[in-house]
Amino acid sequence: MQVIDFIVIVAVAGALSCGGVVSVDGPAEQPGASAAAVGAPAPAAQVGSKAPDFTLTDLDGKSVRLADFAGRTVVLEWFNPDCPFVRFAHGETGPLRTQPARHNASGVVWLAINSGAPGKEGTGLDRNRKAVQDYAMGYPVLLDESGTTGRAYGAKSTPHMFVVDPQGTLVYAGGLDNRPLGNGDGEATNHVDAALSDLAAGRPVATSSTKSYGCSVKYGS
Amino acid sequence: VFRAGEPAELAFAIDVPKGWHIYAPEPGDAGLPTRVTLSLPVAWEAGPPRFPEARRFDEPGGIVTFGYTGDVAVSVPIRLGSGSVAGPAAVGAEVRWLACRERCVPGSAQLAARVPVESASQSAEGSAGTPGGGDSP
């Protein structure tokens, strides 16, 4: 049998020399580690159930509580400004450059939540303040350094998206769209837009759960 | 020499740097599936890519993903249909991946080769002559 053979080299060296990276030598991966070694995962919020309430602090030190938005639709966007998926989505041509403002104008609340533990990628006040400027974000970034809120929602990746309806019920959990980094097959669908359209029209959310994609949320252990 | 009607294979090894991993077609809670998109001559057909057995990665927060480290051997079965055109043929593939350690870096590679193709009748006649341009990659 004839074989066409190639070698593909994964280049990460350039990325390592990017500014702001203090160390990449930590124990990043634990292949073969058992689930017990990282603790049994707490039961996370389920679509159709009440969205877990939280009180988190924004980058100006102001407290933000989910329950304060009762009666309004709330979108939660798990955030890490240095994750390439987040960078793409917030880039000049990315969906998150314009989508939140469009929905804010219809009364939807949009909150970004960073559940990275201190010292991990994309964490800290300064880094996130700069990201808000760079990405022209007109909505709050809430810091969840303990990861409590992220775990309560079962947020696994950035961007992992959740939609809470005006009654406080979690009605969507999953990916932002079917175009990670702008790539994908079939018709392009923004799942959050679709869920918000359903809510606005008084319909049940047709696609209430999709597979999220992106970088893992950088929880502390 | 590639002949119409015969199976062939596109194979590549993805060399992942130490400490990093890329993701399986079913990556689990995070990551991005490693994708192979082929660009094949007329009448060539491809089967699904074959990946090695995935390893499991556990991260804080109960995040479980599946992927590969080290040299990742991927092969794509291809078959030259009876309508394959004899002569030099351009075979291409784009490979996309997400490499992660404590951080993630997306990447892609374009693979391209020109291979000699004999028609089924040529091979049946035992023709030794093959068209030029068959540089091996």
Image: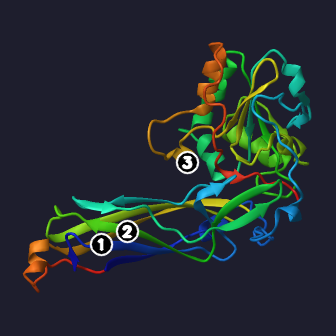
Numbered mark located on residue B7 in the image: 1
Give me the C-alpha separation between circle 2 and circle 1.
7 Å
Residue B1 image position (x, y, % from top left): 22, 80
Q: In the image shown, does B23 or A143 lie closer to the viewer?
A: B23
Going by the numbered disc 2, the residue's amino acid type is: Pro
Residues at marks 3 and 1, CA–CA distance in whole angstroms = 34 Å
Q: Quadrant of residue B36?
A: bottom left
Q: Which mark is residue B77?
A: 2
Dot 3: what SS?
Answer: helix
Same chain, labels 2 and 3: no
Amino acid type of the residue that numbered disc 1 sits on in the rendered structure: Pro
Vertical arrangement, residue B125 with respect to residue B93, above or below: below
Say which chain tag 2 marks. B
The answer to whether A9 appears left or right of A78 in the picture is: left
Using the image, tell me which numbered label, if any, was put on residue B95.
none
Asked if marks 2 and 1 touch (Cβ < 8 Å), the reply is yes
Residue at the spot 89% in from the left edge and 23% down from the top edge? A67
Q: Which residue is mark 3?
A: A181
Quarter of image, res B2: bottom left
Q: Quick one: label 2, few (<14), some, or many (20+) residues within 10 Å?
A: some
